[in-house]
Image (tube, grey):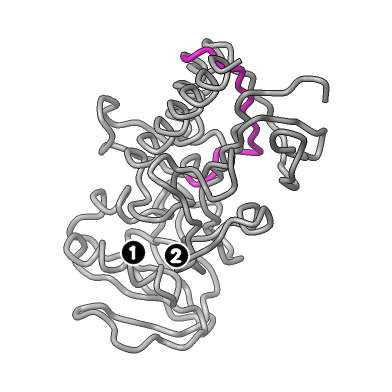
Amino acid sequence: MNKKWDLLVVGKGPAGVSAAIYAARGGLEVLVIAKDGGALEKAAHIENYYGTGLISGKELLKKGEEQIVSLGVELRNEEVLSLGFAPDGWLVTTDKGEYEGKNVLLATGVQRSAPKIPGLKELEGHGVSYCAVCDGFFFRNKGVAVIGGGEYALHEASVLLPLASSVTLLTNGQPIPQNLPENLKADDRPIQKLVGETRLEQVEFASGEPLSVAGIFVAVGTAGGNDLARKAGVPIQNNLPMVDENQMSPMPGLYLAGDLCGGMLQIAKAVYEGAKVGSHCVKQIKSEAAKG
């Protein structure tokens, strides 16, 4: 841990990569740390992001990695365990080491919880999705279901209702929420498994009864909040971390961007917020250098 980085980025999704691009092009020393590609890695089809046409999440992640590496950014595949203070900066501890930086960006995305249902993982990208806004278009005029029972699940269902021929909320044994949107069906039977050879064909309940659907959207739990931000002392309001117009938290040098900050959970928003972080770090460090 001899080197002190200008910017440590936790997460290699759109927000983290965008920040790294702007910071590196501004002459900063940047390290990106990530265990995996998060929710984007599971997106089978993306066609609503500028200039890419139809592309998978894995392809987009790979292009982002190649781009930052070509700019001299160091990329390490490690799991971040904690975030703490260091002299004149921050200390990021991973499963393989410790890294000190003048600034840190948390761009971890949010945890999309996945229930342990046989067939779910096997059919990801083949009828199983984690983003209604991203993939709902591909299920126009087809019957789909949303697994979940909270506000996050209801939000995903509301996105799908104008597109699909039918939308069923599957609470998987949990109580059905009140005040369901019009035309949204609900079923609280426990799910036994998902069935399909090459694509999702139906949901099989514990009773043995099937429900034919073309798509399943997983929306279990909440789409906001992050343990690292909370543990670092970032104030939380309405389950979202507080940041200013430059995505900086009230903790100097600690930035947050992307899905972690709520709003539209979309690539375009994440890229914009990451760009703000990278640009602001360049401006801050150059200003400090000019003062001597």
Q: Gap between marks 2 and 1, in whole Å?
A: 7 Å
Q: Which of 167 and 67 is in front in this view?
A: 67
Quarter the N terminus occupies: top right
Magenta span of residues: 26-39
Q: Is-magenta flag for residue 242?
A: no
Amino acid at dot 1: Glu
Q: Which mark is residue 219?
A: 2
User: Dots 2 and 1: beta carbons under 8 Å?
Assistant: yes
Q: Is-magenta flag for residue 27?
A: yes
Rendered position, 286 above or below 261:
above
80 left or right of 237 in image: right
Q: Which of 57 and 268 is in front in this view?
A: 268
Of pointers 2 and 1, the one earlier in the residue sequence: 1
Q: Residue 121 carries which label?
A: none
Place of residue 188 in the rendered image (x, y in percent of width and height, measured from the top left): 44, 85
Where is mark 1, residue-wise? Answer: 156
Q: Residues within 10 Å of mark 1 (few under 14, many from 20)?
A: many
Place of residue 21 in the rendered image (x, y in percent of width and height, measured from the top left): 47, 21
Amino acid at dot 2: Ala
Place of residue 173 in the rendered image (x, y in percent of width and height, measured from the top left): 52, 84
Q: Residues within 10 Å of mark 2 (few under 14, many from 20)?
A: many
Rendered position, 29 above or below 187:
above
Q: Which residue is drawn at 46% across and 36% down?
A: 15
Q: Nearer the viewer, residue 239 or 291?
A: 291
Q: Nearer the viewer, residue 151 or 230?
A: 230
